Image (spheres, helix red, strand yellow):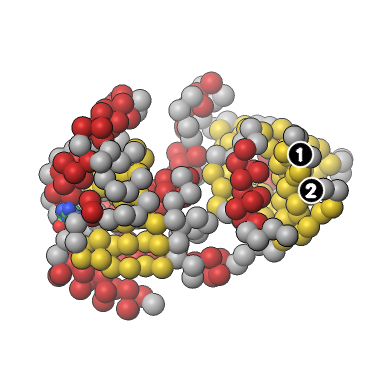
Amino acid sequence: MIRNPEKTLGALIDKCSIAQLCYIDKDGFPVTRAMLKPRERHGLREFYFTTNTSSEKVSALRRNPKTSIYFVDRRFFRGVSLAGNAEILEDAATKERIWREGDEQYYSEGVADPDYCVIKVTVKKVRYYSNFKSTDFNIKTQQAEDSMISIEVVLGDITTLGVDAIVNAANCGLLGGGGVDGAIHHAAGKALYEECLKLVEGLPEHRGKTGQAYLTGAGRLPCKFVIHTPGPVYRDGLHGEAELLASSYANSLRRAEEKQCHSIAFPCISTGVYGYPKEEAAQIAVRTVREFRAAALQRVVFCCFSEADAAIYRRVLAKEE
Ligand code: AR6
């Protein structure tokens, strides 16, 4: 009996270096293709693959979105088959999120290459093959998973929290600064700074982007990871600030999921030096966490540095329940 299929099947999936994706061609024949492993997965419910817009599989899936993906552990002859519907995503935000360094070798024009697109597979049925028998699993509903995330408001210094990951309200330089950024670097010590230097060296123009999130180790801090996100500087609310702040929260949650973190703590991103109105920022933070489809994450902490900030979060949480 598998007690936690998400975990057991997820581990098998994550170990596979390729995936097989099936579709029905224009003559009605089933076709199987080997794909690069999924770039992102949310539990067993959603999988994201990169591919060429001009490929036969994309036109086939546009015609008939029914698909199944298969992952096999050849050593023990075990496999997971996931059937569902495919969508072809070509919007800039998704393409950017799924893009990884080095993808230029497949798409010469970079992330905006019209021949680069993302296949999202939303799974309806899961079947696991092992020991010559197959077992079917139900996919958990969104509500069931959402309700597994607990949200807490904590008053205090984020550098002291023993969660898996803490989020740093950074700037695009990603090498430290004032406010919570300064406190985190100070408490973590030189190891964090050195890791950030390395991280920055690998980024285009040696800078991070507003709304993105970058993960490092945590130096001397009690947590395992620091996720650095440059939030938006607030101007007048008419320059995409709300979307960028939501991206900072969502991307931080994604980085934590990628490392299978169970708990994460956020400071009040952008509401200090960057001047974001506190109440609006708290609403965006809470909404983004509530909408996030978590697999590993079970606990989100909003770490407030003042009682006034904590009171805002408590109010927003009570209202949005
Ligand atoms: N623990 C938890 N929260 C804290 C801590 C702490 N130790 N210290 C401060 N805060 P800010 P921003 C709260 O200005 O607005 C930096 O220089 C603080 O009370 O740190 O996103 C960066 O390098 C406030 O509620 O971040 C960037 O240049 C919240 O953290 C710039 O500031 C965020 O305030 C980023 O500005």
Give me the residue at 60% from left, 53% from top.
Answer: 7
Q: Tell me residue 54's x, y (percent).
A: 65, 32
In this figure, which residue is indicated by the disc labeled 1?
A: 76
Q: Tell me residue 288's x, y (percent).
A: 39, 61
132 left or right, relative to 112: right
Q: Residues within 10 Å of mark 1 (few under 14, many from 20)?
A: few
Q: Nearer the viewer, residue 94 or 144?
A: 144
Q: Tell me residue 240's x, y (percent).
A: 29, 51
Q: Nearer the viewer, residue 252 or 223?
A: 223
Q: Is residue 9 above or below residue 176?
A: below
Quarter of image, res 202:
top left
* The C terminus - image quarter: bottom left
Q: Residues within 10 Å of mark 2 (few under 14, many from 20)?
A: some
Give me the residue at 82% from left, 54% from top.
Answer: 134
**Which kind of residue does numbered mark 1 sit on?**
Phe
Q: Nearer the viewer, residue 113 or 105?
A: 105
Q: Disc 2 on helix, strand or loop? A: strand
Q: Is residue 31 above or below residue 269?
A: above
Give me the residue at 75% from left, 44% from top.
Answer: 79
Distance between the Cα atoms at labels 1 and 2? 8 Å
Q: Earlier in the sequence, mark 1 or mark 2?
A: 1
294 left or right, relative to 195: right
39 left or right, relative to 282: right
Q: Disc 1 on helix, strand or loop? A: loop
Give me the residue at 66% from left, 50% from top.
Answer: 9
Residue 66 visible in the picture? no
155 left or right, relative to 77: left
- Image marks 1 and 2: residues in contact by CB distance under 8 Å: yes
Q: Which disc number belongs to residue 130?
A: 2
Quarter of image, res 189:
top left
**Which kind of residue does numbered mark 2 sit on?**
Ser
